């Protein structure tokens, strides 16, 4: 690095320009700028975006926690019932119902009316279709299609009930399916959901029938 010599301008002169009268000069290390808090600067905008991001993260974490509690709160009774009675209530349709309730508690398709009517439609329709033609992929397809149409007409769609119709079409369990597992499984799912809706904070489930 060179130094000033007489009238000639040097590199250090560029780095250290002379101060004018009344000029306090640039802030030292660690000193805040006088205009750091003025509106319209980029730094406050970034701070607001970061704050919003952290709030979204907290909301997501809370939602995930509530969903996990709801899922466990519905599945555990199914496990207990099957373990104590031998009824096959812990099967795909009712597990899917628990998942739908946990993931979309405010959706019309998981309200008590939709769950009750959905299964009340899908299971008998599937049994009636499967009985004369036997278990097959075709019986399952017909049962699923008919169940969906009727649920739409009744304005009570419940997607997991369609899975029950498909399983009946594929396996032809007979009318015993109504007693094992339909009635106890649906009752356990709805009762557990209503209890969670009443006592679990941040679980926004619609308690109304419709």
Image (cartoon, rainbow, N blue to C red):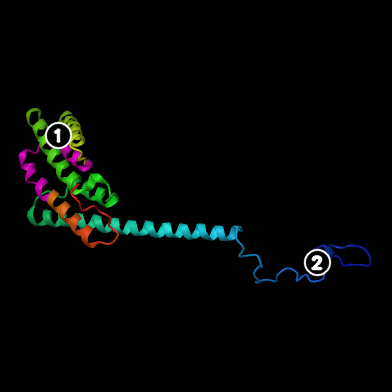
Which element is circle 2 on? loop
Occupied quadrant, residue 199: bottom left
**Is residue 181 something one can see in this rendering?**
no
- For the N terminus, the quadrant is bottom right
Q: Which of 96 and 187 is in front in this view?
A: 187
Give the mark toward the camera: 1 or 2.
2
Q: Residue at x 82, y 71 (%)?
A: 21
Q: Residue at x 55, y 58 (%)?
A: 46
- Tell me the number on the disc at residue 118: none
Q: In this view, does 31 lie to the left or right of 112?
A: right
> Which of the labelled discs sits on residue 16, or is there none?
2
Magenta-colored segment: predominant secondary structure? helix
Range of residues picked out in magenta? 158-185
> Residue 59: horizontal and vertical position, in percent?
38, 58
Residue marked by disc 1? 169
Front residue of this view, candidates 210 and 31: 210
Task: From this view, report whether residue 109 is shown above or below residue 85.
Answer: above
Asked if residue 178 lies in the magenta stretch, the reply is yes
- Dot 1: what SS? helix
Residue extending farthest right: 6
Q: Is residue 133 left or right of residue 28?
A: left
> Residue 70's x, y, as percent?
25, 56
Residues packed near mark 2 inside 10 Å, few (<14), some (14 to 19) or many (20 plus) = few
Judge whether residue 101 can be spotted in this image.
Answer: yes
């Amino acid at each position: 690095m060179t130094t000033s010599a007489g009238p000639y301008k040097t590199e250090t002169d560029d780095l250290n320009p002379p101060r004018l009268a009344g000029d306090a000069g640039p802030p030292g290390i660690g000193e805040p700028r006088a205009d750091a808090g003025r509106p319209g600067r980029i730094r406050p905008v970034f701070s607001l975006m970061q704050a919003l991001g952290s709030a979204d993260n907290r909301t997501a974490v809370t939602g995930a926690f509530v969903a996990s509690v709801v899922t466990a709160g519905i599945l555990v009774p199914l496990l207990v019932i099957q373990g104590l009675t031998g009824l096959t209530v812990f099967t795909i349709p009712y597990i899917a119902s628990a998942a739908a309730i946990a993931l979309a508690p405010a959706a019309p398709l998981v309200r008590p009316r939709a769950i009750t009517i959905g299964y009340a439609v899908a299971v008998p329709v599937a049994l009636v279709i499967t009985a004369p033609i036997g278990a097959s992929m075709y019986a399952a397809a017909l049962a699923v299609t008919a169940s969906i149409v009727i649920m739409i007409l009744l304005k009570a769609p419940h997607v997991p009930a369609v899975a029950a119709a498909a399983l009946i079409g594929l396996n032809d369990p007979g009318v015993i399916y109504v007693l094992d597992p339909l009635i106890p499984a649906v009752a356990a799912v709805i009762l557990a959901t209503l209890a969670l809706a009443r006592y679990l904070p941040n679980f926004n489930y619609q308690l109304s029938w419709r």
